[in-house]
Amino acid sequence: MCGIAGIVMRDGRDLDEARLDSLARAMAHRGPDGAGTFVAGPIGLLSTRLAIIDLATGDQPLFEPEGAVLVANGEIYNDPELRAALAGAPYRTGSDCESPLQLYRRRGVDFAADLRGMYAIALFDPSTRQVVLARDPFGIKQLYYVETPEFFAFASEAQALIAAGLAGRTLRATARAELMQLKFTTGRETIFSDIQRVLPGERLVLSAGVVVERRTRPALPAGGPVAGDDEALLRELDAVLLDTVAHHLRSDVPYGLFLSGGIDSSVLVALMARLTDQPVYALTAGFAGSGGADETALAGRVAKAVGAEHHVVEVTEADFWAFAPAVAAALDDPTTDAAALPTWLLARAAKGRMKVVLSGEGADEVFGGYSRYRRAGILGALAGRSRTRGVFRKPLADAPALKGWRDGLARAEAAQAGQGRSTMQRLQAIDCAEWLPNDLLVKLDRCLMAHSLEGRTPYLDPVVADFAFRLPGRAKVRGGLGKWLLREWLARNVPAAEPFARKQGFNPPVGEWIAARAGSLATLVAAQPGVAEFLPPEQVRAVVGDAARRGQAAWSLVFYALWHSHHVLGLEADGSVEDVLDAAGRAG
């Protein structure tokens, strides 16, 4: 696990290694355990390392006898099985990331087809002078790039490309509209005009710094739902879940779990307890004394039932005012998901106690947890559109600056047409292509890597997806509840989790907190230059002033003001929310 980056000069000139040094400094938080570079004329690769597997010999770059060189950010969970299948291959280290290098020599660009894990990989083959970039099918690990007439450059974080002077800070207005209305941005293009994403599952082949080929490994299996008996499905589910958690516990460093009290993390902690001899270290965010959804008591009962060591991290209004700027600074590829704040604080609390954290992202998408999937089960094709309403409602939704916010989703919907899938599956596939990688997984990666922690997501495993995505609809939605099969498994294995009770979600009471200082905050947000570019001050003040009722909309504006101050204006994120916004207003 680390950060990776690289530069390929397009004119054949030797690379200025100072540019690699700038990238390394910008990603130092991702790899406090070491850094390594490879330079061959116009090509340079970089890795900053957070040591998880093979602490002694796993430093990168990695090399194979015929000269190919690799840097990778991620974990290959089936590395032991791959090594057994590649008997006789000239392995030089115990690193799990060496298997992709050995597979490349046998399969070429298709080397990632059998990888089970999360990864962003860059590989250079001196025999062809080509560079290959690859990203895991769900997009758990991010990879960004910029193309200019002079060079092609890539990095694990968009901000690294900007900090190294390889990309500018100019924004795309359509992406800003998406961010405001969807809470994330869609597709290949990021909010920065110069920077693009390697898409989930994509492999790019570069020759002389030019993309000459793109291939994609799909995250989800083809075809519609398949029939299955409840008892048989529960037995298969147990085997699939046990297998994925066992693979995700492969680590040479301490690990733990974020336990929310919900279905997904409760299933994980039960399986971890079954597979480990020591009590599982579990952290839960609490919102005591506020109107936020606080499930610490339920999480405590689950932890007690499985023998986990449970710790509560109280997230307070004071934390919001103190740390929201740092959270915005961490999310260079922005999402206005308010759960980023407790995720960041949980990671801060976990640092020093563990290096690896398991988390439940992806369960809703592959097992059918969201209300829109439940509507699809009832309404069929009539419910076939994803997110028809944005965060901001009329009349603000009609503002020119928010036009086109749904265009990217419409393209994703069109891409899912005609594949023989049910309406529910199409909605799941859209979420897996857009919402999951560009909101939930970015949030997890940045909030944890800000504290040099690795996040692992057992539900986002090809073995799990192949089983869960093709479940019959009644195994996903039943009795008005999503994730029926997961709930039934939990009811039988950990009844203390109360799996058939309605869950509250993992949302801090940001509207309540903003409302407490709405008067002064509304003025500061309205005066922030990035916000003033696209919304009149009276509309901004109206939204922030009504934060008690319009919490997400108010938070979206506050977050964007903080984010823009750091990532566009280049101001430090030190100080409270008011301090940062006041400085931004004066700078504008």
Image (cartoon, grey):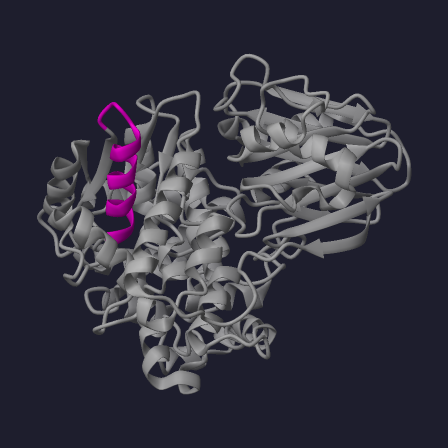
Say whether residue 231 is visible: yes
Say whether residue 24 is visible: no
Residue 583's image quarter? top left
The residue located at (31%, 51%) in the rendering is 339
Q: Give the image location of residue 132, x and y in percent.
A: 75, 42
Q: Give the image location of residue 343, x and y in percent.
A: 32, 43
Residue 356's image quarter? top left
Front-most of 66 and 338? 66
Residue 410's image quarter? bottom right
Q: As drawn, is 468 to the left or to the right of 433? A: left
Q: Give the mark count.
A: 0
Q: As drawn, is 91 to the left or to the right of 383? A: right
Relative height, residue 299 to residue 175 (above, below): above
Q: Give the image location of residue 247, x and y in percent.
A: 44, 35
**Prevailing SS of the magenta stretch:** helix
Q: As drawn, is 386 to the left or to the right of 545? A: right
Q: Give the image location of residue 116, x and y in percent.
A: 54, 42
Outermost residue on the right side: it is 12
Point out the stretch of residues depicted in magenta.
263-279
The residue located at (17%, 33%) in the rendering is 310
Front-most of 208 and 29? 208
Q: Is residue 277 magenta?
A: yes
Relative height, residue 133 to residue 469 (above, below): above
